[in-house]
Amino acid sequence: MPRKQATMTSDTNPSKNSGSAAGGKKRGKNAKGGTGKADNKTVSFSANPDPPAQAPVNGASNGDAPVLASNAASTEAAGDVTSSASSPGDATTTASPSAGSSDGASPSDGAGDAVGSLDEPGQVTEADKMAIAKAGYKRLCSDATLQTKKDGYFRTFDSQVKPFSRKKSATHAEREKECGNRHFKEKKYRQAVCSYSQAVVRAPQPGDPDAGDLLSVGYANRSAALLHMGEFRLCLQDIEAALGAGYPTRLRYKLLDRRATCQLKLVLQQQEEELPALESRSDHFLSASSAVDVTYSPGEGRFAVAARDVKPGDLLVVEKPHASVLMAEKTGTHCIHCLKRVLAAFPCRECSGVMFCSPACAAAAEPYHRWECSIQDVLQASGMSPLCHLALRIITKHGLEFFQKLRPELERARAPGDRPSTDSAGKQYDPDNYLAVHQLVTLSELRKPEDFFHRTLMAVLLLKHLRVAGFFGAVTEDDQADRALSSDELLVGSLLLHHLQLLQFNAHEVGEYVMMEPGQFKQSRSVYIGVAVYPTVSFFNHSCEGGVSRCFVGDTLAVHSVMPVAAGQPIFENYGPIYSHKAKPDRQHWLSSRYWFDCRCVACEENWPDYDQYDINTVLLRCTGCGAGIENDASGKDPVGDCPKCGKKNNAVELFRQLGGAQENYHSAMNMMHEGEPKKALRLFYRFIEQCQELVVRPNRDLSLCQEAARMCLAAQGSLHCIRQKKTNVA
């Protein structure tokens, strides 16, 4: 069916909500994982003839050029919004996108619980003021999971939804092709690839009256530039695309000769880095190793535990997301399906607002992008958060017929049991099964009416756009009116509202690791590029110490252990605030406001010091009898071996000797890491972590620094972007 495009019209100013939150987990986890930092500004080769300038996100320039202009430009194009009334309770949000929670810790009070004292100003105590501030911050955090763009129209929209999106343009494609040709002649091959990619994205598809040979020539010219860059696989991919798009017969000999050259070169080229496979898979959890199990308790809900002893470096989970969404500002540099960085873009057949890294990703995205294609730009202009787009993506991924068939199953109550299941047959827990997502915690019983109201507004906004996209059938004039919802629309609307609640506590940030140069860990960082829902990883509860590391290849997530875990003990991850960088009161406030639970991890219960407060002159040696800490001078002078708990006389001199050997491993590993050998460094990091487990009692500064370094090395084995690439000479 023909796809209509959508916009919204308005006669009022857009709402002033702002913020940058991504969302989260069970009781409660917001978008988990990572710093929440946005990527630096990149030089923009625009996909629009005259786009507005893209504002810097972090204030610096990394010199990398996006293949396609950002969707941020669509706010102006789609932003004439009609408003009938502004919704109550608008607030300015300032929460950052980040992570976290535990399934059953007691929740914090909701927004508004403490404001009664304001009626009698003379009786307001300092405790009242703190409670009011805490409740207000919690509300801001919740609001930010719905709207993150301050100039979006979400809080002021009415029922008028009209077509809009960026269309194909032969004129623009021709201009970009000529720009690419100039770069190619100047041997600026990377710039040439960027220009040819924009030509390919904007070129009309074969069969269009304006198509000509723009698409096929764009692919062919780009393949020549890729050959010079040594990107042989991408070159072959473009050659096949050019031939499939109708490249002129008289010129095909060039492509065939180029294809033969690439095939010869590929014999000598190394394979790309990929995530490792699980050595032994769990009998019940499709994405987890046999070292992981999930248990249930009334106080903590469902949570991951070690099915056997876990060692540092053990691969625990490799999981593709049930659904993922790319940040709007990354659509000019990354594939919207797999979230990998794109060098040579492949287009949507209908719009010019997105790109794919390969024809395979374009085909895989078709089931959901066919519905989102015509409404994506206007939805981004609404200012909705990435979590809202993810709530929609879960619907469009499966399609209406899927949910119609699933309706009886959804209407049955499903109480949590000892082990999570995905269907009545009790089959293996599959993260791609919709019920694995549907069963995740929403904390609806703790929500305030205002929160429900705002989430219902967002569900209505998403539903109206699905309607005009033809998701429920052919679009009619009645679809613009406030008619009664059909049974299918009621079903999908209720699911959208359900998703908006559960994703607040069960989504993870997706990251890409960024270095200045290959192998240079100094100033390296993880950059937030999208959000996704990983049902299996959602079972990992929070600890302010954290025991695992996350590594992404595109949107596929690998979880490694970075500390020993005894069989039967919980396996913890960290949702954002780590004890070594943030004091306990700040961590507790942050977690209770964003994820609705009070953390009772060992770092909080024992009030571990952060790096600024840590006493570097003291070390706690581990008693070989009871495991208690024996306080000693870190220098090893006048060692004390008598355990204050069990009275055992330990050989403190020997313990210090072994600790010195362990520290040599740690320093050697740090040197290897900074010399660009992270894989070798990891082996020594893991050894040091095991030795510390035997010799000292946590918290230990060197142990914490070692775990951080191991996480950096693991992250660099996944999706990695180097701002300054080493030059490669290709014959």
Image: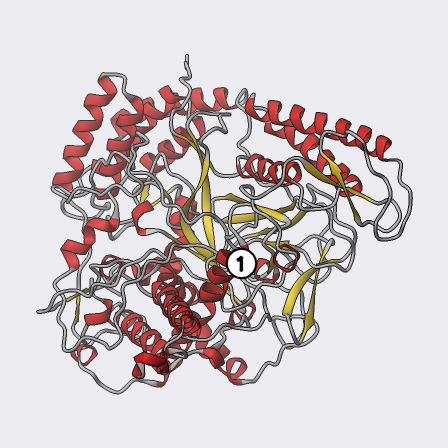
Q: Is residue 533 visible?
A: no
Task: Pinpoint residue 139: horizontal percent, then vertical percent.
Answer: 37, 69
Q: Is residue 413 left or right of residue 617?
A: left
Q: Nearer the viewer, residue 49 or 302?
A: 302
Q: Is residue 315 left or right of residue 720?
A: right
Give the farthest residue toward the bottom.
484
Q: Nearer the viewer, residue 433 or 242?
A: 433
Q: What is the three-letter code of the residue carrying label 1?
A: Tyr
Residue labelled with disc 1: 534
Q: Nearer the viewer, residue 403 or 209?
A: 403
Q: Vertically, is 553 above or below 538?
A: above
- Residue depicted at 23% across the width and 16% down the height: 186
Q: Is residue 163 left or right of residue 315?
A: left
Q: Nearer the viewer, residue 427 or 289?
A: 289
Quadrant of the frame with the N terminus:
bottom left
Secondary structure under the numbered disc 1 in the rendered image? loop
**Dot 1 alpha-carbon crowd within 10 angstroms: few under 14, some 14 to 19, many 20 or more:** many
Q: Is residue 62 visible?
A: yes
The quadrant where residue 504 appears: bottom left
Task: Pinpoint residue 224: horizontal percent, then vertical percent.
Answer: 32, 23
Quadrant of the frame with the C terminus:
top left
Task: Pinpoint residue 56: horizontal percent, then vertical percent.
Answer: 26, 41
Give the farthest residue toward the front.
122
- Residue depicted at 57% across the width and 73% down the height: 106
The quadrant where residue 366 appears: bottom left
Q: Is residue 109 left or right of residue 177?
A: right
Q: Vertically, is 186 above or below 611?
A: above
